[in-house]
Structure formats: structure tokens, C-alpha cells
Amino acid sequence: MHPDLDHIVLTEDEIKRRVAELGEQVSRDYGEESILLIAVLRGAALFVADLAREITSPIEIDFMAVSSYGSSTESSGVVRIIKDLEELIEGRNVLVVEDIIDTGLTLKYLLKNLASRKPKTLEIVSLLYKKDKQRVPISCKYVGFDVPDEFVVGYGLDYAERYRNLPYIGVLRREIYAE
Ligand code: PRP
């Protein structure tokens, strides 16, 4: 385990197994219909790469980058699009791929924005979901794991851009971010 972590929450194996299950579920639901996966940078980059390989339906991948104003650990609710989609989504099956839903504010904004572009379907897959923390109700069709409201890093999730490359997800030691 990385020395900056307090404990591991999800092992590499647990993540791998669950991502495979999510891929199967998505493939069953969409069948031969094509899906546009929209990954929200940067955290979801690792998850979408693994999830995409577990989906048997035809897929395309596009990326969006958003930034929330305010502190780095807490979403302020004000979201700005830094990088928009390359693709038009009107009439398409859109599946937004997130690494974590925390307060739900990022997705609330994003869903409203994407819905206005008139996709045929619009669903969310999030690897992690902080249930206790939710401030706005987000209907997320595919959830990997419910996690407690702790500072988790790894598998795409960062603290100050670090730890995204850990193959597992763990809780950061308090003294690391309280410094
Ligand atoms: C994280 C995560 C979501 C958002 C969730 O991104 O990837 O996009 O926060 O938080 P919310 O539900 O409270 O809105 P972050 O802003 O940390 O950027 P990153 O993906 O580049 O790390």
C-alpha cells in the first residue's frame, strides 16, 4: 500500500470484477445499439478505458472537461466547461462516465447541459457514489460501489493531481491533506 494512505477501500481485484459486471450490464441493456461514452476528465479517464473494454455493444468515446470554482476538495456548484465534446449527441445513446459522484453538483449541471442537446437516451455510470454526501438528487443508472464520505484516491481519483495511477482505491491519511 502507498505510504500516504490510511487504508485500502477497494482492491485492484474488486475494481476489476465490478467494472466487468458493469460492462456486462451495459452491454445487456443496449445490445446492438451504439453508445457514446462521455468521460468526464480527468478522473474518469482510467475507468472509461477499462469499462470500454468490457462493453460488447458498439461504442464511441468522447471527453468533456469541466472545472468547478472554489476549493479543490469541495465542489462549489458553479461549473464551467473547459473542453466540450467533439461529437454531436442529438438522437444518440449517451452514457456519461464518472469516477465519483460526491455532492452531485457537477453532474446536475452536466446533465442539464447535455439534455438540451437532445440525445435519444442519457444515462450515467459512476464507479463510486458517496451516498451520505449527496446534496442534489442524481439518478445514476449504473453504480460501481457506494463509498463512505472519506477522502478517497487512486484509480483516477487524485489529491493535488497525485495518486491517480494507484491501481486500487484508498483513503488518504489526514496529515497529507491537512498539511
Ligand atoms: C471530481 C469527479 C467529478 C466531481 C464529482 O472531479 O471526477 O467530476 O468531482 O463531485 P461532485 O459530485 O461533488 O460535483 P474533480 O473536480 O476532482 O476533477 P478531476 O476529475 O479532474 O479530478
Image (cartoon, grey):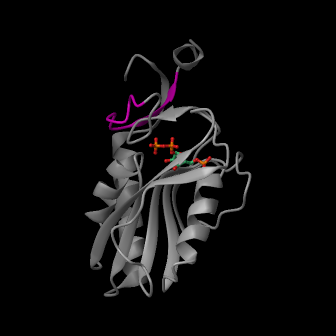
In depth, the one of 127 and 138 nearer the eye is 138
Q: Which residues are magenta?
A: 161-172
Q: Residue furthest right?
A: 135
Q: How many marks?
A: 0
Q: Is residue 91 left or right of residue 33?
A: right
Q: Quadrant of residue 21?
A: bottom left
In depth, the one of 147 and 33 nearer the eye is 33
Q: Quadrant of residue 35?
A: bottom left
Question: Could you tell me residue 86's position as x and y percent?
Answer: 33, 68
In depth, the one of 39 and 129 nearer the eye is 39
Question: Could you tell me residue 108's position as x and y percent?
Answer: 64, 61
Q: Is residue 20 above or below residue 92?
A: above
Residue positioned 56% across, 76% down in the render: 115
Question: Could you tell me residue 59's position as x and y percent?
Answer: 29, 75
Q: Is residue 32 above or below residue 44?
A: below
Is residue 56 shown to the viewer in this render? no
Residue positioned 41% across, 61% down in the render: 84
Query: Could you tell me which quadrant the N terminus lies in?
Result: top left
Query: Could you tell me which quadrant the C terminus lies in?
Result: top right
Assess whether residue 54 is covered by the magenta stretch. no
Residue positioned 60% across, 41% down in the render: 69
Question: Could you tell me residue 121's position as x and y percent?
Answer: 50, 82
Magenta residues, dominant SS class: loop
Q: Is residue 111 above or below residue 100?
A: below
Q: Quadrant of residue 61?
A: bottom left
In depth, the one of 63 and 127 nearer the eye is 63
Is residue 95 shown to the viewer in this render? yes
Residue positioned 42% across, 46% down in the render: 43
